[in-house]
Image: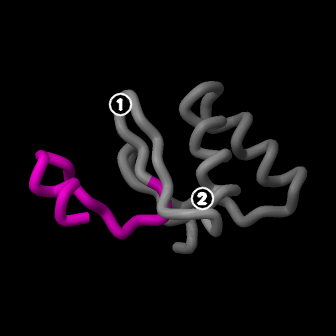
Amino acid sequence: KEDFENNGGIYSEEPVVIGDRLITSKGPGTTLEFALAIVRKATGPDMEKALREGMVIANCKCDDNYTCGCNN
């Protein structure tokens, strides 16, 4: 974390972070939300919603384009 920040990075404690060109997640426990963030960025919120409904996953309540906790 310290090296990352010392080299200009912005560290976040959020499980999934969505940027303009990069989506990253905190670790293996965030894999599903990470995958759904990719779907949302690539195909839009309707496809993400359909997948969440089909897999019985709670809807994401995040309303910004940069972070996604989805434990909200």
Is 60 situated above or below 46?
below
Crowd band around label 1 with a 10 angstrom C-alpha radius: few (<14), some (14–19), many (20+): few
**Count of labels in the image:** 2
- Measuring 55% from the left and 63% from the top, which residue is drawn there? 27
Dominant secondary structure of the magenta stretch? loop
Q: Which mark is residue 69?
A: none
Q: Which mark is residue 60?
A: 2
Tell which of 8 and 33 is nearer to you. Answer: 8
Is 8 situated above or below 26?
above
Q: Position of residue 57 (x, y in %)?
A: 77, 63
Amino acid type of disc 2? Cys
- SS under mark 1: loop
- Measuring 42% from the left and 44% from the top, which residue is drawn there? 18
Q: Position of residue 54 (x, y in %)?
A: 89, 51
Choose top left, top right, bottom left or bottom right for residue 47: top right
- SS under mark 2: loop
Q: Is residue 34 left or right of residue 52?
A: left
- Measuring 67% from the left and 60% from the top, which residue is drawn there? 59
In the image, the segment drawn in magenta is: 1-16
Is 7 situated above or below 46?
below
Q: How are the colours assigned in the image?
A: one colour
Crowd band around label 2 with a 10 angstrom C-alpha radius: few (<14), some (14–19), many (20+): some
- Measuring 80% from the left and 45% from the top, which residue is drawn there? 51
Which image quarter is the N terminus in?
bottom left
Tell which of 24 and 2 is nearer to you. Answer: 2
Q: Is residue 8 left or right of residue 25?
A: left
Whichever of labels 2 and 1 marks the residue nearer the N terminus, that label is 1
Q: Is residue 49 left or right of residue 26?
A: right
Q: Which mark is residue 20?
A: 1
User: Residue 64 in magenta?
Assistant: no
Q: Of all residues shown, which one is farthest toward the front?
A: 3
